Image (cartoon, rainbow, N blue to C red):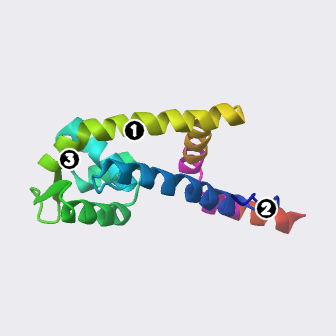
Amino acid sequence: MARMDKQATLGTLLRSLIDQLDPAVERAYEGLGLGYRPRFTPVVRILRESGSARIKEVAQRCGLSHSALSQTVSKMAEEGWISVSPGEDARERVLRLSMKAERAYPALEQQWSITAQAAESISSDIGISLEEVLKRALQALYEKSFDARLLEARETNRST
């Protein structure tokens, strides 16, 4: 495995982290023989908890844009993981887990536990909770966007 360049910046580091995690998780799901994708997980978990939800609600709970989640929802419906029906408003779509998802849920839940355990081993190796670091970074960005931070940095550089 290649080592990370010491000059790598934040964006490169984040992409590299995802490049290390996602394929491994994808392979674990392939090993289950379910045709499941990691990006389905937040939708499955939310629908399992709530029974049904509008796509807008799921997007908000996942912290994803409506358009990003729409792509995932389309793929999930195409592959038989969820059903999509019209809501009260013609623009609204209501999501529900399919029988395929319900049958696969115990295996998925077990894999999520294994994945969480593997993630905890990373935190143990680095001496800090990677999940907590990411949650804190996202919270800071919700409170003040990166756009605002870039503008502040630009202003600071003009002043000096």
Q: Let me know if residue 61 appears in the view.
A: yes
3 or 1: tag closer to the N-terminus: 3
Can residue 140 be found in the magenta stretch?
Answer: yes
Amino acid identity at mark 1 = Trp
At horizontal 24% and vertical 36% (from top left) the residue drawn is 49
Q: Quadrant of residue 82?
A: bottom left
Amino acid identity at mark 2 = Asp
Assign the magenta stretch its main secondary structure: helix
Can residue 44 be found in the magenta stretch?
Answer: no
- In this view, the residue in front, 37 or 148, is 37
How would you rate the neighbour count of disc 3 (Cα within 10 Å): few for under 14, some for 14-19, many for 20 or more? some
Which quadrant would the N terminus be assigned to in this image? bottom right
Q: Quadrant of residue 64?
A: bottom left
Q: CA distance from mark 2 to mark 3?
A: 41 Å
In the displayed structure, does residue 6 sit left or right of residue 60? right
Identify the residue position indicated by label 2 in the image.
Answer: 5
Specify the label residue 101 is tagged with. Answer: 3
Total labels: the figure holds 3
2 or 1: tag closer to the N-terminus: 2
Q: Which residues are magenta?
A: 139-150
Percent position of residue 44, x then y:
27, 46
Identify the residue position indicated by label 1 in the image.
Answer: 112
